[in-house]
Image (spheres, helix red, strand yellow):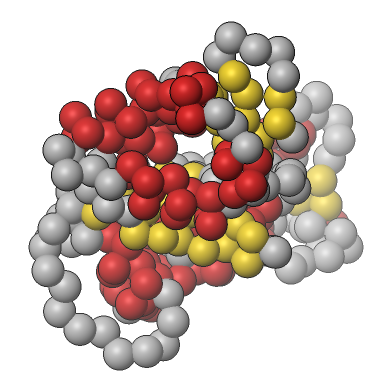
Amino acid sequence: MPSAEVIKISREFPDFTSQFSAPLLVPDAPAPALVSGPRGKQADKRYNVYRNNVTVSLIEALASIFPAVQRITGPEFFRAMARFHIRETLPSSPLLFEYGREFPAFIDRYEYAQDMPWLGDVARIERAWLDSYHAADAPVLRGEELASVSPDRLEDLRFKPHPATRMISSEYPVVTIFAMNRNAGPVGRVESLPEDGLITRLADEVVIRLLQPGGAAFLNSLVAGASLGAAAAAGLDANPSFDLSGMIGQMIEAGAFSNIEMETSDVEHA
C-alpha cells in the first residue's frame, strides 16, 4: 500500500474522507482532487495501486467468509463475482468479517450464477455460520431444566434463543451442499429436496444440523416468542408427521436456547 510520502491527502477539503474513499471501488474514476503525488503532481497511478489493494483485500475477505461458495464456483469465477459485488457495495465497518452481508442477495441476481439457484442460500449458511461464531456467550438450556417442568405446564413454556442460534430454510438441499463443500473432501450427487438447517455454537464450535420437515417452522415460532404449544402446532401444520419430542431433544442437544419461562409466571429458569 502506498505510503504517506507517495500519496499526499490535502485536509483543506472539509469532507476529505468521503472524497478519498468514494472513487476507490469505481475502476474508471479519476483520483480525487484532494490527492496529489510528489511536488503536487497528479497521483492517478499511485491512487490506482491503492484502489487495487483495497479491492484485493475485500475479495480475500469474501473468500475467507464464503469458502464453500468459492469451492463450488472455482476461484476465478468467485473473484470475478466478488469484484462486481464490491463495486456496488461499500464496507460499512472497519471489521472485515462484517463485510459481505449483502453478498448472498447479490449472488441471487448475479447473471452468471443463475444456473446455480441454490448458491445464494449456501452463502447465507456461511454468513450465518460466521455470525454464530462471533455471537455473544450465554448459558444454554439444559435438558434437566425442561424435565423439571410439570407436564401440564409444558405447552405454556416460552424459550429465549441463544445469541448464536441461526436458522436457514431453502427450496434446495443447501445444508448437504454446504457440508460437502466446506472441506476438501469428495463431492457427490445430491438429491434435489428442500432442506432446513439449525446453526448453533457449543464450546466455541459452530455446528449446522439438518432439520426434519417442520423443524424450521417450529423453531422459528419459538424464536419469535410463541409458546411451546403454538410452536408445536406450527410444526405440525408444516409437516403432519412432525416429531415434536425428537425436535425438542435436538434443540436441547444443540444448545439452541438459553432459558425458559412460563407464559403466565414470573419464574424464569436460567
- Residue closer to the observer: 262 or 47: 262
Q: Is residue 134 left or right of residue 225?
A: right
Residue found at x 71% / y 31%: 269
- Residue closer to the observer: 146 or 224: 146
* Vertical placement of residue 164 versus 38, above or below: above
For the image, the number of numbered tags is: 0
* Residue 222 position in % (x across, y down): 45, 30
* Vertical placement of residue 43 versus 89, above or below: below
Residue found at x 48% / y 30%: 151
Q: Is residue 153 visible?
A: yes
* Residue 213 position in % (x across, y down): 23, 48
* Vertical placement of residue 241 versus 227, above or below: below
Quadrant of residue 192 within the rendered picture: bottom left
* Residue 264 position in % (x across, y down): 58, 9
* Residue 170 position in % (x across, y down): 25, 48
* Vertical placement of residue 197 versus 32, above or below: below
Residue found at x 42% / y 75%: 182
Extreme top residue here?
Answer: 264
Q: Quadrant for the C terminus, please.
A: top right
Q: Is residue 64 left or right of residue 181?
A: right
Q: Is residue 98 visible?
A: no
Residue found at x 67% / y 52%: 134
- Residue closer to the observer: 35 or 198: 198
Q: Is residue 78 left or right of residue 268?
A: left
Q: Quadrant for the N terminus, please.
A: bottom right
